[in-house]
Amino acid sequence: MPECRVVGVYSYPVKGAAGRAQRQLHIDPAVGVLSDRRLAFKKVAGVQDEWAPKSAFYVGMNTALMVAQVPAFVKDKDGDEKLDPRWLEEVAQRLGVKSLNVLDTHGAFSLADRPRRYVSIINLASVRALGEFVGTAIDPARFRMNVWIDGLDPFAELDWVKGHPGTLDIQIGGIRLRVDEACVRCKAIEANPQSGEYDLELQKALEDLMLGRGYPGAPHNKSPRVMGVLAQPYSHGIIGQRDKVQPF
């Protein structure tokens, strides 16, 4: 197996909004990536402060502008970060709503698309292969994954998904994780992270590419529209730049 390493790590404090490049991610087996998808903007004010499907929130799947919104934070009197009220007003205006109803998990759980404790991983060779297929370079930020890796062949990471739930472990730096799912992609990947507009029909392109490769579909729902994998950590730890990635 070629040497595979982490080349980027990202957290997404606000579900649907732009991510933040980090030097390292702090991993907690109870929630996945600490502070990842801690906040979200409810489409309906009455939604309870608990995990809900992404359709309950303003996200790239239903609101292309969200992916281009870069969260701004301020420190409160205790030194903790909170969303800047002025930024919230600006985003509300851009989305054409009077105000935003913010769900804050306070770190008790993640608002990731699947109600499990995942770290998301994307293979940059797979992104490049999709770009070659559609004839244009594709920004990996479209896929909103925590850990970017390089050094594998295109889509070799899908070989780590052995059934559902998974049975194969990988090691990233000092952390062991079980690879549980291939990540099935929604319309959010068609939203440009810079312009906040739907500009590439990537769902169909991804399906055509994967069917052409003979991919049988994600084990949990048989969809061929996959990019990246989701893995559950066994312990606390840190994932950082240049960490080595290998099957356990």
Image (tube, rainbow, N blue to C red):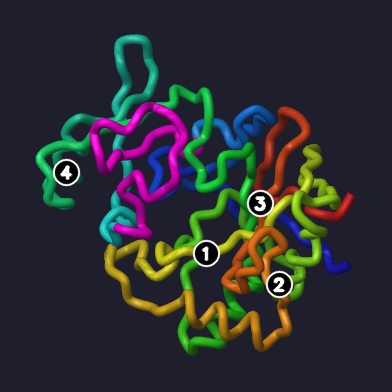
Q: Which x, y percent locates residue 9?
A: 58, 48
Q: Which residue is mark 1?
A: 185
Please say whether residue 145 is one of the residues in the magenta stretch: no
Three-letter amino acid code at the position of disc 3: Leu
The residue under the point 46% across, 34% down is: 51
Of the numbered discs 1 and 3, the one sitting upstream in the chain is 1
Q: Which residue is mark 3?
A: 230
Q: Residues within 10 Å of mark 1 (few under 14, many from 20)?
A: many
The residue under the point 68% across, 41% down is: 239
Q: CA distance from mark 3 to mark 4?
A: 31 Å
* Extreme residue toward the top, this view: 78
Q: CA distance from mark 2 to mark 3?
A: 14 Å
Three-letter amino acid code at the position of disc 4: Ala
* 35 relative position to 39: left or right: right
Please say if 94 is above or below 226: above
Q: Secondary structure at mark 3?
A: strand
Q: CA distance from mark 1 to mark 3?
A: 12 Å
Of the numbered discs 2 and 3, the one sitting upstream in the chain is 2
The residue under the point 50% across, 25% down is: 107
Label 4 or label 1, whichever lies nearer to me, is 1
Mark number, residue 105: none
Q: Which residue is mark 4?
A: 92
Please say if 109 is above or below 171: above
Range shown magenta = 36-62
Q: Residues within 10 Å of mark 3 (few under 14, many from 20)?
A: many
Along the line of sight, the residue nearer the viewer: 184 or 176? 184
Q: Secondary structure at mark 4?
A: helix
Q: Secondary structure at mark 2?
A: loop
Callout 1 touching callout 2 (CB < 8 Å): no
Three-letter amino acid code at the position of disc 1: Arg
Callout 1 touching callout 3 (CB < 8 Å): no
> On the image, which quarter does residue 91 sit in?
top left
